[in-house]
Image (tube, grey):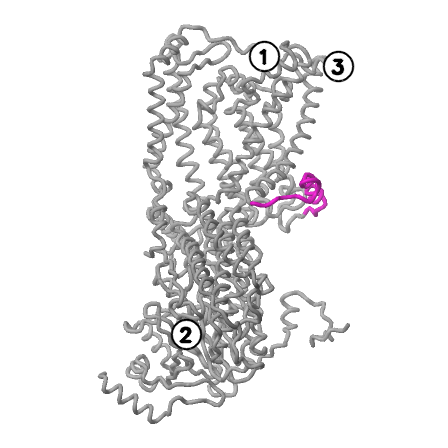
Amino acid sequence: MSSDAPNASEHVFEHTEMLLNMGPQHPSTHGVLRVLLKLDGETVVDLDCDIGYLHRGVEKICEHDTYPMITPYFDRLDYVAAINGDLVYVEAVERLMGVEVPRKAQYLRVILAELQRITSHLLWLATHALDIGAATIFLYTFREREEILKIIENFIGARLTTHAFRIGGFEWDANPEFERDVRAFLDMFPGRIDEYETILSENRIWLARTVGIGVLSAENAIDIGLTGPVLRASGVKYDVRRAAPYSTYPEFDFEIPIGETGDTYDRYLVRMQEMRQSIRIVQQALDGLPEGDVMAARVPRVIKPPAGEVFHTNESPKGEIGVYLVSDGTNTPYRLRVRPPCFVNLQALKQLAIGHLMADVVALIGTVDIVLGEVDR
Amino acid sequence: MTNDDRSNETSSESRTTPAPKKAKGGVDVVDASDDQLVVRLRERFGEAITSAVSMVGQRIVTVTIESVSEVLAYLKSDDEFRFNLLLDVTAVHRPEEDPQFELVYQLCSTTTLERVRIKTGLADGAPAPTVCGIWGTANWLERECYDMFGIVFEGHPDLRRILLPDGWEGHPLRKEYPVEFRENRWIAENLNIHALPDDADFSGKVEI
Amino acid sequence: MNRAWGNFAQRRKGATVSSIVRPGLVSFAVSLFLCVFDAPLREVAAQTQTQAPPPPPSPVVPTWSPVELIESLGVSHGFAEYVVLPAIQFAVLLAAILTAVAYLVYLERKVAAFIQARLGPMRVGPVGLLQPLADGLKLLAKEDLVPQGADRLVFLFAPVIAITAALGLLVLVPFGAAWGTVTDINIGLLFLLAVASVGVFGIVLAGWASNSKYALMGAMRSSAQLVSYEVAVGMALIGPLLFARSLSMQEIVEAQRFTGLWFVVLQPLAFAIYFIGSLAETNRAPFDLPEAESELVAGFHVEYSGFRWAIFFMAEYTNIIITSAIAVTVFLGGWSFPGLETAVSWIAGTDPSTPLYSVVFTLATLGVFTVKVALLIYVVMWIRWTLPRYRYDQLMDLGWKWLIPVSLANILITALAFLLAMRPDQGGVFGLLEVTKNGLWIGWTGTAWFIAVNIATFTVAAWLLKKLNRTSWTTDIDALRRAEAQKRAGRLATATERGAR
């Protein structure tokens, strides 16, 4: 060996950090997220997200599909909250076309969207708790989620990728048992949320694992463009249902729960509270459910929105989902852009995780609540 | 600006452009020059604001590419508007027009709940200014724009492909990129799939 | 703050200092009152000082042993006692334990299922009873993979170390009286602890040899965890040993039988420490960090497949059986149970030398021991399916800042209390217990005294440690947040110092 050759052992121990590849096959990256961690011992000193494993080119496909054909693609973006995805798309098209959706359809949409929000939050709670090691709550939340999925299936015909709405309203009216089923669920569910909170909210280990983990200040959260519960947990009272009201949300009385410090525990509390608020909305919508048609009268057979553009946003369970629709007057969109809340929120992971331990990274991926179908599109 | 001034300006605008202007088969495009925000922007940036319209109740302000980052920075920092939340950065490709690209920024304010869309034209191959320094969220959004359209953002700290793999050829959301197209070469090289016959049929026809 | 939160703001305060300390103080006062000031009890205490302790319970351990049966086949006594009988015993034990391990997995799945409002395995055999068999067959049929770049020899050998350490311990566990146990040596407990810690080599070597970062991290966590919790566990066992006055497993059981008191009554604190520590030592939730599936995928055995993986699994469950068995032996009276002798005498008479008595008594003690161990294992499973997982640093906090100081204090104070409680002529002060030829005799007052001391130890230690460990024990959310922020900044500073960033 020549004298100027680097000493092998010196070279190895020069760096104290270890590069750890987490995903895309990993039990707690919620799909096919790949996270590259630079660890110093167990401390995360740097992090990079590698996404795109689920990229299907939805935006490109949409440019070649007619408007009614596009709705199912929105089911498959955030596939655990398909109805919220559907809603933002059909509302965007309706807004561009100036279609007036009947009030009954609007109310039914709100009911379905809020029920879907509950299922999404339940799934989040299940996986988040599972990541932190509380396995049992996973099954409890799935039990309740199943009830909602049954209601949705009885009405729409599908459980997950629902294709719930048509441009202009609904394909058919709600099944006769719909109201009864939803009311039964509303009676049962608040007690179940109490059950979850009994297991977690004051559990010492749960507190130790969530309190103070991934603190994000309000300015920081806004700077990264976070929306949804993640933003609200940082103390920003911004909810699209109130900020840019759509559908019939202004008619309902509900509150926007916000957090104080923006740590993982606050995000947990905010989402738990949001489920309770969703119940309130569904209750009011059911009580005030109008009579009448569920499909707008004057929706043309071939849907050709006038040339123009619209940016319509909704409050999806993950954050603000938006559709930027550019129409050239033909039966396919000229450009359709999805503003994905998960994609933007995932960007916060780096800021959240640096300085925490590796075990916290899984808690943080869970707390951001991403669905890779929407991140990658 | 006094009330008088504004009313004067409004009336003069309404004389020159009969509202509402209706594109052929298009949605109503209402001139938004009298909007307070637009007035303020024009006051400050003058000619840089090329147009201001309102479509289905949404404000769209078009800005020249040179001053877009200044306008955005102003909108964020201005005490009156406080557009502190950058919702989206995207582009629209119109190959038949000049300039070919249109960069679109969706802004929102968490305090006043106002929204505005800022657009700017961009020639193919021309660099666009980054807004990463103004909003952290622009980092990934601009990366996606680069990935999908090939728009290069000057000054971006980490401009790499984000959704597509490194080494992918082409930018799929450009209009010339075909929708039914398989990168056989890339797949064969990177995913180790060599089993495809040379005369593989990708037409989608199924023989029964 | 949104008013929908009002409810939380109140509830989030959680437990306060007084809610822990107050009950402790109250019960301490009550015990002390009973112990010192109550006149009738003082009378009893006076009696115990003068009277000789009652003789040991009349029906005793059987004297007949299967050795006689083997001898009658023409084998010499020594060969029968030291070779043939232990061989038979160990063969039976091994078969029983391996079956038990398989069914523990079944039980775990069933317990988990019932906790989680579902059914668990139901398909293979009636109510899924043949599921372990199916699992075993499946694992046997799987390919035995060795990852590229692995240290092949070590990789293949590591599970053997783990299972050998676990199974080798079985010979010393006093499953039953007389010939219900394979062997009994006078340093039994010490030997158990020593050999149990060999098992960690299996884990460390498996993690190292796998050539995988996840496995390596799992192994590192595991070794750190086992080493630190072994200290607490070992020291927690010293308390009861003061009363047992022996390291032999059978004599520890006999001591509890003689005094009529399980040591969990005299040493509840030591039992709690031992139980928590043993959860950590067997990598069970909430301390299952070495194999935390959500972080490390599977930890040290992430690269193992097929039967080698099954061997790790078996070693883990054998370890659970053994730690539970030690807990039962040392704290819960082992194979003894109040009234057991009487119950046996109904069936088999009172003559301890008859073969029938011997068989019935031994089987009864085996049954008692098994039931106790099973109940303890059920608690272990119950905890696993209820609690979230600790983080690495929190686990170390719990071990080093809480369990070890408390166990040290427990030894010290128990020894002092023991000394004080002895008869004056034996070198003590109060005369609440008596050292006799057959063992310790502890009366009512003695029991009350030790319980009081234990509660006092816990209360004082908890209070003191709460003061010392402010960051790791606070129920105030804001304080927790501050502490976490401080830790984060500290870690970042360390990393920057080392040049990792």
Hey, which residue is sitting farthest front in the picture? Answer: A291
Q: Mark 1 lies on which chain?
A: C
Q: In which quarter of the image is residue C402?
A: top left
Q: How far apart are marks 1 and 3 (CA)?
A: 28 Å
Q: Mark 2 lies on which chain?
A: B
Label ID, residue B152 = none
Marked residue nearer the N-terminal end (1 or 3): 1
- Looking at the image, which is closer to me, B18 or C156? B18
Give the number of the mark in front: 3 or 2.
Answer: 2
The magenta segment is C117-144
Label ID, residue C75 = 3
Magenta residue check for A275: no
Q: How far apart are marks 3 and 2 (CA)?
A: 94 Å
In which quadrant of the rendered image does the C terminus of chain C lie? bottom left
Amino acid type of disc 3? Val
Q: Quadrant of residue C177?
A: top right
Q: Is residue C75 left or right of residue B134?
A: right
- Looking at the image, which is closer to me, A160 or C264? A160
Q: Mark 1 points at which residue?
A: C60
Provide residue C214's location: percent of width, then percent of height: 55, 49
Q: Is mark 3 on a helix, strand or loop?
A: loop
Q: Which residue is drawn at 51% across and 36% down?
A: C279
Q: Name the residue under label 2.
A: B106
Amino acid type of disc 2? Gln
Provide residue C317's location: percent of width, then percent of height: 60, 36
Amino acid type of disc 1? Val
Q: Is mark 2 on a helix, strand or loop?
A: strand
Labels 2 and 1 touching (C-beta < 8 A)? no
Figure check: A284 above or below C172: below
Q: Residue at x 59, y 20 (%)?
A: C184
Magenta residue check for C127: yes
Q: In this view, does A365 lie to the left or right of B132?
A: right
